[in-house]
Image: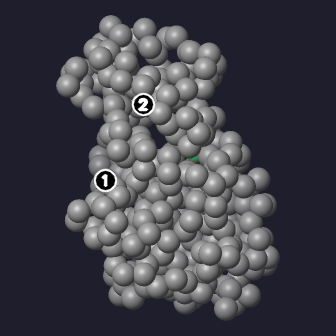
Amino acid sequence: MSQKPQANWTSGRNSDGQLHASPFIRWAGGKRRLAHTLMETFPQDFNSRQHAFFEPFLGGGALTFALGNVDHQVYVPGKKLRVSDMNPDLIETYVVVKDSVEKLIRRLRVLEDRIDEKNYYVIRRDIPNSPVNRAARFIYLNKTCYNGLWRVNSDGLFNVPFDKAKTRKAKLFSEENLMACSKRLQGASIRHLSFEKAAMRARPGDLVYFDPPYIPLTPTSSFSAYSKEGFGEEQHHQLAEVIAELTKRGVYVLFSNSDTPLTRQIFRDCLILRSHPMRRSMSADGNNRKNVNEILGMNYSHLHGSSVGEFTLVSKPKDKTQILQ
Ligand SMILES: C[S@@+](CC[C@H](N)C(=O)[O-])C[C@H]1O[C@@H](n2cnc3c(N)ncnc32)[C@H](O)[C@@H]1O
């Protein structure tokens, strides 16, 4: 692990004056606030110059962007980045940010003059035929729809309503940040893949960060069968099997989710689980909201940073071969 001076978290800039790239979209379950803690829990001997970092549930990519800050203790160069997600519209947008950021910015400037309810529904209905215009539409809808949700119907058509609080003054993007995101993604592999297929590409010594959709506090029968996102209890069990397989192959795994009884049960045999007091509000039974801790899991015991004290050890696998030494 390369040792670097601690980043300046307050200015948002590297020591060379460059802006730190940060997520260019709003995303449910985004890890912006947890990114620094996650870096502290990287494996002590992960070598990001020689081995790759994988984020197979990419979403807004908070950790992927944070790891591009050259002043951080943990820095992963773009060419060692392998990011993927099952959302094809999201992945297409990342590819456009990487390859055609200037054209994208030009198109976003046009859309920024069209933030109102009437235009929203016109833009929502019409799917452009160029990747750049589709990516601009994706960012427009993400920034102006209700709650920043990306939800499509069974035909794959986006169906979230307009956020009536948005006015013409709302901002769709920061040009400087989009340029920084584009720079960050140079050299990276950006793929539309399921987490299983993405994980198969990892080699011994690589690190895979899994941040799957949250397990609800009180799983309903619809979650147990097949959640709205298509990621229910069965998919979490499959993820636990993939993690056990990666451990056998000598791949480091870091995992995060909501700290619920079901999360503990599914992942306790393949990961060391630690609870972190970063509380987020989740629905307990549809209406009542409750605060839930975040759970972090690792298949290794030597952590990079010194803030282990902030976590409560929840459990360790009984079978010691489930942990990389
Ligand atoms: C909790 S979000 C990740 C948030 C991300 N860490 C961030 O900082 O914004 C989970 C992501 O998993 C993706 N996803 C859902 N099912 C998937 C699957 N089977 N394989 C890969 N990605 C999937 C969703 O599209 C979503 O972007």
Q: Is residue 285 visible?
A: no
Q: Residue at the location (42% across, 30% down)?
A: 105
For mark 2, does the 10 Å Cα neighbourhood hold few (<14), some (14 to 19), or many (20 or more) residues?
some
Q: Residue 124 at what x, y percent from top left?
A: 46, 16
* Picture disc at residue 281: 1
Q: Is residue 107 left or right of residue 225?
A: left
Query: In this rendering, which labeled residue sits more in front, label 1 or label 2?
Result: 2
Q: Are marks 1 and 2 in contact (CB under 8 Å)?
A: no
| Residue annotated with mark 2 | 105
Q: Residue at the location (55% across, 83% down)?
A: 1
Q: Residue at the location (55% across, 52% down)?
A: 185
Q: CB at mark 2 closer than 8 A to ligand 1?
A: no
Q: Is residue 316 left or right of residue 168?
A: right
Question: What kind of element bears circle 1?
Answer: strand
Q: Nearer the viewer, residue 145 or 207?
A: 207
- The count of marks equals 2
Q: Quadrant of the C terminus?
A: bottom right
Question: What kind of element bears circle 2?
Answer: helix
Q: Residue 171 at what x, y percent from top left?
A: 27, 31
Q: Residue 115 at what x, y percent from top left?
A: 30, 18
Give the amino acid at mark 2: Ile
* Picture disc at residue 68: none
